[in-house]
Amino acid sequence: MLRLHLISLMLTGCLLTSVTACMPSSVKKPKLVMLDHPLVGKIWHVKQQAFVDQSTLVEQLLANEYILLGERHDNLVHHQHQAWFIETLAKQNRHASVAFEMIDNYQGDRLSKQKITSVEQLIDVLNLSKSNWQYELRYKNIFAAALEAGFDIDAANLNSKRLMHTVMQGEEKLPDDYQQMLAKTPFTDQQYGALQLEINEAHCNMLPDKSSRSMALGQRLRDAIMAHSLLKSKADVKVLIAGIGHVRNDRAVPLYLKTNLNNSENKIFSIGFIEVDNELKNAKDYLQYTGYQSLPFDIFWFTPKVQRTDSCEELRKHFKDMKLK
């Protein structure tokens, strides 16, 4: 279901339960399907309720200081679009930083101590930390575009073990910086309930209530951390590469930016790269299908879909394997 695609799972695809473990991830190039869907390649402007072309999109993007690009992590078309945008910024002679959900604070510390001169060196440094991100396959072209442009590459995430430890302690034990960001952006019961519901649905309704509540706090904390990383940047344009759930205007990184920026003139723009659905041929069908009056992005960019295995079946196997251990 499309609704399940609108959130990014916690901890780079890991479950936040009493034991944190990752489901296996294939290193093969993913197969794309629905390439001939009528919406593939089209760009829907949510506020205008109309399609726009890439040149119009570029004009709008360049008018903003914070640009958030939300992806499905295994969809290489999404990464191609992200690399294109970074190349476009470079051609416009804009000074930018590019923050990645896929780079945590430990990796960022290592990068800051070296002069990175090639994408191969960058990936080697990142791979000193064990992760599930598949940098070579998925992110090499984006890294290359940022390095070629001379843009800063920033960490936007917290190390997964540290994040898990922080979340399990509870919100009152968070570091002061993060507590302040969360305090400035309080969630209503409705926002928390909607987030927890989506987390449960994304995990096939197999999570214990305590785990889904912890994951909701973890998701909220990660959004605050990503916003914090963007706010620290001195670049003219701050770009975020993250899972699509983190770039939602209603309760994710854009919301934390708005409540923590002192200058109301700072402009924030969110793009959701959306995989098409074979049963939905018109852009407005996606609005109705998700149950929203308005999609929680500024731009909806339609792409082919990655052919995936049954995630619920994988999750059942994951829980079974955990029990056996």
Image: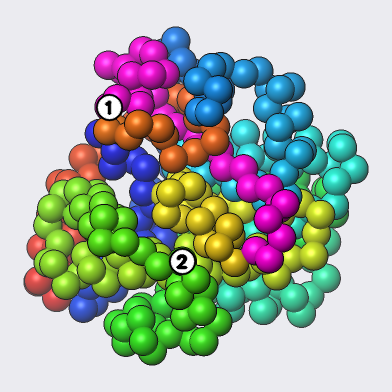
- Going by the picture, which residue comes out furthest to the right? 93
Q: CA distance from mark 2 to mark 1?
A: 28 Å
Q: Earlier along the polypeptide chain: callout 2 or callout 1?
A: 2
Q: Which residue is mark 1?
A: 289
Residue in front for this viewpoint, 176 or 264: 264
Judge from the rendering whether residue 99 lies leftward or rightward of residue 97; answer left or right: left
Please give the count of numbered marks on the rendered protein: 2
Q: Quadrant of residue 119?
A: bottom right
Image coordinates of residue 11 in percent, x first then y, are: 39, 65
Q: Is residue 161 above or below residue 197?
A: below
Judge from the rendering whether residue 213 lies leftward or rightward of residue 138; answer left or right: left
Query: Start and end of the magenta stretch?
Result: 261-289
Q: Quadrant of residue 169?
A: bottom left
Q: Amino acid at mark 1?
A: Tyr
Q: Which residue is mark 2?
A: 185
Q: Is residue 29 visible?
A: no
